[in-house]
Image (tube, helix red, strand yellow):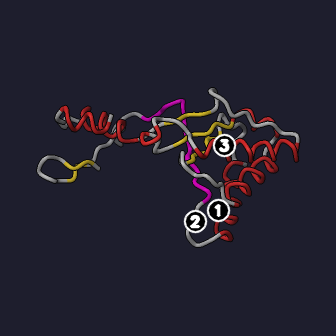
């Protein structure tokens, strides 16, 4: 949703339902952790995630989304990474990438989270001898404000230079 000059909310869609969506690149998003009802719900959600994943013959990628300024990774994150590795073939580690969201405020860098993530991945490697690479090829930093702005412009909304500067 974008608010126009008259403070009217406008829905911006990238792909309409009328478009031919027979795309060969299918991305399914499975949100498994962070349930506000507690860890038992996170565990149940994770079980459901594994059931869903098991329907696929092959996973092209596993994207783990993180905020850039978490100085501590909670027990849920640790549990999910360990359970994921326990239930998937060890080659799945080669398809894991880390996506840092809301990174405009950190100049598109992972910041504090990267240090604790590396520490956690080192513990996993020492415990299970499975190395999950964390490097330039497996880290992506982005922010959705620029994307929202581009989508709105594509749909005909006009912005002043000052407004564009604010989201760039």
Spatial CA distance of label 3 from label 2 is: 25 Å
Residue at left 29%, top 44%? Answer: 12
> In which quadrant of the rendered view does residue 77 lie?
bottom right
- Residue 164 is situated, as x and y percent measured from the top left of the image, at 25, 34
Closer to the N terminus: mark 2 or mark 1? 2
Q: Residue furthest toward the top? A: 137
Residue at left 61%, top 59%? Answer: 33
> In which quadrant of the rendered view does residue 151 lie?
top left
Query: The residue tagged with tag 1: helix, strand or loop?
Result: helix
Q: On the image, numbered disc 2 is attached to which residue?
A: 35
Spatial CA distance of label 2 from label 1 is: 8 Å
Residue at left 67%, top 69%? Answer: 39
- Residue 127 is situated, as x and y percent measured from the top left of the image, at 88, 47
Whether residue 29 appears in magenta in the rendering, the answer is yes
Stretch in magenta: 21-33
Q: Residues within 10 Å of mark 2 (few under 14, many from 20)?
A: some
Camera-nearest label, 3 or 2: 3
- Residue 126 is situated, as x and y percent measured from the top left of the image, at 87, 43
Query: Could you tell whether 152 is left or right of 114 in the image?
Result: left
Q: Residue furthest toward the left? A: 6
Q: On the image, numbered disc 3 is attached to which residue?
A: 115
On residue 45, which mark appears?
Answer: 1
Spatial CA distance of label 3 from label 1 is: 27 Å
Query: The residue tagged with tag 2: helix, strand or loop?
Result: loop
Whether residue 48 appears in this view of the structure is no
Query: Could you tell whether 36 is left or right of 158 in the image?
Result: right
Camera-nearest label, 2 or 1: 2
């Amino acid at each position: 949703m974008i608010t126009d000059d008259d403070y009217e909310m406008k829905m911006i869609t990238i792909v309409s339902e009328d478009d031919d969506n027979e795309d060969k690149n299918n991305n399914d998003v499975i949100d498994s952790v962070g349930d506000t009802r507690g860890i038992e719900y996170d565990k149940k959600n994770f079980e459901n995630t594994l059931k869903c994943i098991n329907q696929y013959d092959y996973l092209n990628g596993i994207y783990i989304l993180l905020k850039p300024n978490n100085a501590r990774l909670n027990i849920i994150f640790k549990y999910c990474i360990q359970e994921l590795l326990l239930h998937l073939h060890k080659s799945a580690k080669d398809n894991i990438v880390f996506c840092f969201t809301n990174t405009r405020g950190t100049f598109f860098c992972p910041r504090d989270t990267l240090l604790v993530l590396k520490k956690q991945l080192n513990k996993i490697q020492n415990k299970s001898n499975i190395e999950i690479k964390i490097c330039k090829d497996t880290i992506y930093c982005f922010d959705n404000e620029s994307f929202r702005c581009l989508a709105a412009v594509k749909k005909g909304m006009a912005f002043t230079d000052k407004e564009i500067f604010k989201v760039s």
